[in-house]
Image: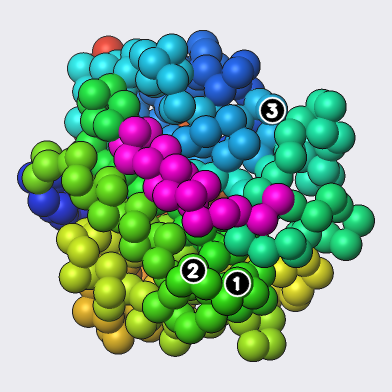
Amino acid sequence: MKLFIPIKFRNIELKNRIVMSPMCMYSAEDGVANDFHFVHYGSRAQGGAGLIITEATAVEPRGRITNKCLGIWNDEQALALKKIVDFVHKNSESKIGIQLAHAGRKGSTWENRQISIEEGWETIAPSPIPFHHSERIPHVLTIEEIKNLVQDFRKAARRAIDAGFDVIEIHGAHGYLIHQFLSPLSNTRTDEYGGNPENRARFLMEIVDAVNSEITENVALFVRISGTEYAENGWDVNDSAELAKILKTKNVDLIDVSSGGNINGVTIPLSPGYQVPLAEDVKKIAEIDTAAVGLITTAEQAEEILESGQADLIFLAREILRNPYFAVQAAWEHEEENFYPHQYLRAKPAK
């Protein structure tokens, strides 16, 4: 099966094409990972996934979605994450990545509702447009503040590298800050960070350049985008493909194609593999490796996506929450070789 054929990005080889997609766990204290995160990510490594990516990890305090989200803006946070990275490297064949993120106007929330400034913080955005009309108008970033945020991403990347992460993924999807800059529906600026597509992408490009200034060939660089935001005159798959062409010239190794999240109240056509065509379009138009994500639940479905050339990696979200041993079990069922903890070998089915 192609699902179990290794793939290489820079000097990082993934033993299979199964990836644990970043998913918020809302369980951190002051952005610091704890025992829950150690077990949560460690168990997926024991389950044989080729790559594990941590949940959205904020590059500064206002970058969190909630008070319980992970961060990597200080050394204490990086040290707690290093403990997880070291375990994964020592006890599995999995690689581990981190998703660097900033929530922007979608921060300071709990249970999908904005909390008060007293409980949370003042949100920021490219333009004075809240995600929902009931929310506070976000603070509009100055050019100097934008430049400082780019440096926050650079510093976070440095900490991630020092912690031993194999992959850095920049979160440019789901209506968070980078996506807010990309979309003409949330970015109405008239300076060099607004207006035409090149200007709206400038923030992301500066972040990519900053992260690239810190990483080497021993760390791969992914970017997650929303292939479309399902809104008239909004960001769409053609924009995504054009963006991917530019990112390819900036040594981005893979585009992780999700969708939605920036415009409140839109209808998303949910069905098995509903975002796969977006990954396929970006892959074919931009000629870059892509990842498919979204209601992919079986090895057979994943294999069909890979064999048909629609994507190069399969990101599993809810399915790998349900079954941390998805990769191991798929390998058993299809008589493929895959990592399995030596402590558990007595439970491995005989061929």
Q: Place residue 102 in its image quadrant.
A: top right
Q: Which residues are magenta?
A: 139-157
Q: SS at mark 3?
A: loop
The residue closer to the viewer here, 89 or 246, is 246
Q: SS at mark 1?
A: loop
Majority SS type along the magenta span: helix
Q: Residues within 10 Å of mark 1 (few under 14, many from 20)?
A: some
The residue positioned 74% from the left and 52% from the top of the image is 138
Residue 67, numbered label: 3
Mark 1 lies on residue: 189
Q: Nearer the viewer, mark 3 or mark 2?
A: 2
The residue closer to the viewer here, 344 or 100, is 100
Q: Type of residue at label 3? A: Asn
Q: Type of residue at label 2? A: Tyr
The image position of residue 201, as x and y in percent, is 43, 70
The residue closer to the viewer here, 263 or 344, is 263
Q: SS at mark 2?
A: loop
Q: Is residue 336 visible?
A: no
Q: Type of residue at label 1? A: Arg
Q: Does label 3 or label 1 sit earlier along the sequence?
A: 3
Mark 2 lies on residue: 193
Q: Does label 3 or label 2 sit earlier along the sequence?
A: 3
Residue 218, numbered label: none
* Extreme-right residue of the structure: 134
The residue positioned 34% from the left and 33% from the top of the image is 155
The image position of residue 90, as x and y in percent, is 21, 17
The image position of residue 119, as x and y in percent, is 82, 26
- 82 left or right, relative to 183: left
